[in-house]
Image (cartoon, helix red, strand yellow):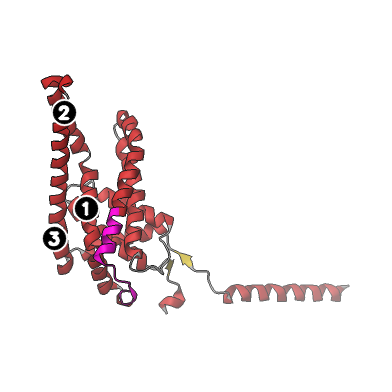
Amino acid sequence: MILSCGENCARLKRLRGARQARRLTRPAAPRHRCAMARAVQAFLLALRDLPNARVLRILALSLALTLLLFVAAGAAILFAARRLLDHGRWLGESGTDMASALLVLLLVAGSWLLFRAAAIVVVGLFADGIVAEVEGRHYPAAAGRAVPVGWGRGLRLALASLGRLIAGNLVALPFYILLLVTGVGTVLLALGVNALLLGRDLEAMVLARHPDRPRFDRGARWTAGLLSAASFLVPVVNLLAPIASAAMAVHLLHLPRRAPTMKDRG
């Protein structure tokens, strides 16, 4: 009996030793980076790309066209609405003036969406140049495998983004109006809606050059859209937002999705 107990104890020790050895030799599972953290890192990397000479040239040209389109669209809307109000004789002169003032306020309140819409169309035309420049500097191997996106496809992507912008915000419009009484509810809802839309737009823009790459993680896509949408809200910063967002999408596509292990570093 004593011998049997000793054998059992020895057997248990051997089993424990084998288990510990397997734990030590078992390769560590890859640690996946937080998708939101990757999006923030991509945004910070994009800010470093802005001082680049070629990026600045694209920025200046796209900004000039965006502002021109923005002013022209706003003036056309105001002129058309004013003409429509002029035909509404039932309002009277004072009513027409009041309606015009209300329209101006609505245009000011909607200028964020109007500027974003203009920026989408313009940046869509220059997107391939922006993405190619950032990829060439930071990810030359990926740039060599990229599929060129011509003006035609870039315009189609831009118009598709514009369509999503209009449709998404028209669907949310009743809720925007209902939340006006809360003071901040409309702004927060608009930020959330447009974060979803912009995340989708940025993903489509970079995947057009790399159709074989997987889509962004949901958290990364939403965070990238949120950073982009928030940057459109800040005066002066919103002028840089379209180019910075495009560069951010490039980095987000190519940043590794898992944290480097000791084997990768060694």
- Callout 3 secondary element: helix
Q: Which numbered circle lies on residue 220?
A: none
Count residues near mark 3 (Cα–Cα under 10 Å), then give few for <14, some for 14-19, many for 20+. Answer: few
Q: Are marks 1 and 2 in contact (CB under 8 Å)?
A: no
Q: Amino acid at mark 2?
A: Leu
How many dots with numbers? 3
Q: Amino acid at mark 3?
A: Leu
Which range is magenta? 142-159
* Whole-percent x, y for residue 150 in the image: 26, 67
- Of mark 1 and mark 2, the one earlier in the sequence is 2
Using the rendered image of the protein, determine whether residue 248 is visible from the camera's viewpoint: yes
* Whole-percent x, y for residue 12 in the image: 74, 72
- The residue that label 2 is drawn on is 85
Q: Is residue 172 above or below residue 247?
A: above
Tell me the chief SS of the magenta region.
Answer: helix
Count residues near mark 2 (Cα–Cα under 10 Å), then give few for <14, some for 14-19, many for 20+. Answer: some
- The residue that label 3 is drawn on is 61
Q: Nearer the viewer, residue 212 or 238?
A: 212
Q: Nearer the viewer, residue 93 or 127?
A: 93
Which numbered disc, 1 or 2, marks the residue closer to the eye?
2
